[in-house]
Amino acid sequence: MLTKTFGSAVQGVNAYTITIEVVVSQGTGFFVVGLPDNAIKESQQRVEAALKFRGYRMPRTKVVVNMAPADIRKEGSAYDLPIGLGILHASQQLDTERLADYVIMGELALDGELRPIKGVLPIAIQARKEGFKGLILPRENAQEAAIVNSLDIIPVGTMQEAVDFLEGRLEIAPVVMSTRDLFQQTANQYEADFADVQGQENIKRALEIAAAGGHNVIMIGPPGAGKTMLAKRLPSILPMLNMQEALETTKIHSVAGKLGSHASLIHTRPFRAPHHTISDVALVGGGSNPQPGEISLAHNGVLFLDELPEFKRTVLEVMRQPLEERRVTIARAKLSIEFPANFMLIASMNPCPCGYYNHPEKECVCGPGVVQKYLNKVSGPLLDRIDLHVEVTPVTFDQMTETRRAEDSRTVQVRVAAARQRQAARFQDFPDIHSNALMPSQMVKDICRIDDAGRTLLKTAMERLGLSARAYDRILKVSRTIADLAAAEHIELPHLAEAIQYRSLDREGWAG
């Protein structure tokens, strides 16, 4: 007897429906075909143990499981449940006509309990797209899948519950979630707030500009000056996630298995801070079964690289292209997968190995040339993609003990959101550009026009400060963002002057 059940395979951030055909016929042996990996081939032992534990029998004849289409590689243990139910139906131990109505996924324990799986959100989206009535899956994954409406999400704790539901002996109410209500209740709730930071008003201003224009930032300063504390609070001043961004972000975290059990829609902008020992693959994504890396997990949020010069040179270099294209493509012999990677980069570093170069009180003990050698660990092409260079100085005792509460994140966020709305109106005819930081050079010339006084100021600054040629476009982009924050139609002299001071590392002899 031939039985068909339906599962799903996830490639990148998209899912593809898999038809699982089971035939029980004369002969002996258990065969799984259709490009399964070892985890699927081992399902025989898990399925057989689960069937026996729940009082069913494993056919002692020939069992063939075909996973179609056969040219897509299937991976993981999430096919245990559809294979088990297919065997029960093909061996006439399960009497139902409802198998074709549902996509079924779940990993079986040896006692028939179900364990949670990864990638549920894209699976649910694809199941709805293809017209399935519902999705049967482990109870822990139900809230995540319920983000998708117009699809019956049937949570089950054991294989027996799935059998009873399909045969009509057990009624299981579909999990229903009001996604928009939940999103509105939980959006914009961050634990860290700008009001926690005493002093550092100039750094907060720089981060506000960065958030308003989507600019990348590098902070240079001694240990304990507050670089990490400030970076962690950057997501709280970015514009609120909209529903589309929240779904995109949740899909990526679902595929990577980072949501955890009973999780649902991600409602705050992600903040990722990988350690400097991270590998190339862990940062940009990849592996034999390509998974999203840290830059994709930071999609629609912030990637924080602390102690930037300590990262391996190759790790920093592979990040250059995703910074420009806002996505990363992972190519293999038989497939090519694209992960989104639209993130803000914020980096921090000490000015020298000892950390006290240019410190107002402590003396630097680094020898001649050591400071420049340390700074050279960060390549020019990567630095070229960072718009704001900010020098962070330690907070004084008076600032630390000040009782007046600093401006909170919500207040700053309102100004940032207003500036982003002006940019959205400006770039409405350019779907790939939604902030000033993404403007190509030709567009910078058209949009960031300055008058004669501005040109004179910029020329003087570049000559006197020894700014490099690459600083020119960056200064114009940042000055356009400052003008947007001030609700100014044109770039004015104060906007240019403020933008010029954010190019510390471009100054010739800065570390000399």
Image (cartoon, rainbow, N blue to C red):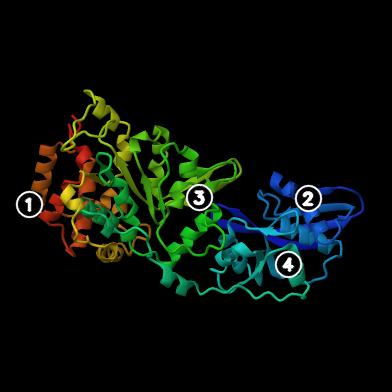
Front tag of 1 and 2: 2
**Mark 4 and 1 residues: CB-CB less than 8 Å, in contact?**
no
Mark 1 falls on what kind of element?
helix
CA distance separating discs 3 and 4: 35 Å
Q: Earlier in the sequence, mark 1 or mark 3?
A: 3
Relative to residue 363, is residue 469 depicted above or below?
A: below
In the image: residue 18, left or right of residue 394: right
Return the residue at label 3. Answer: 338
Q: Where, by quadrant of the figure, is residue 450 drawn?
A: bottom left
- Which amino acid type is marked by label 1? Ala
Front tag of 3 and 4: 4
Return the residue at label 4. Answer: 162
Q: Earlier in the sequence, mark 2 or mark 3?
A: 2
**Does residue 2 appear in the picture of this structure?**
no
Q: For mark 4, does the 10 Å Cα neighbourhood hold few (<14), some (14 to 19), or many (20 or more) residues?
A: many
Return the residue at label 2. Answer: 44
Q: Earlier in the sequence, mark 3 or mark 4?
A: 4
Mark 4 falls on what kind of element?
helix
- Which amino acid type is marked by label 2? Gln
Return the residue at label 1. Answer: 453
- Which amino acid type is marked by label 3? Glu
- Which amino acid type is marked by label 4? Ala
Residue occupying the point 73% across, 67% down: 162
- Position of the C terminus by quadrant: top left
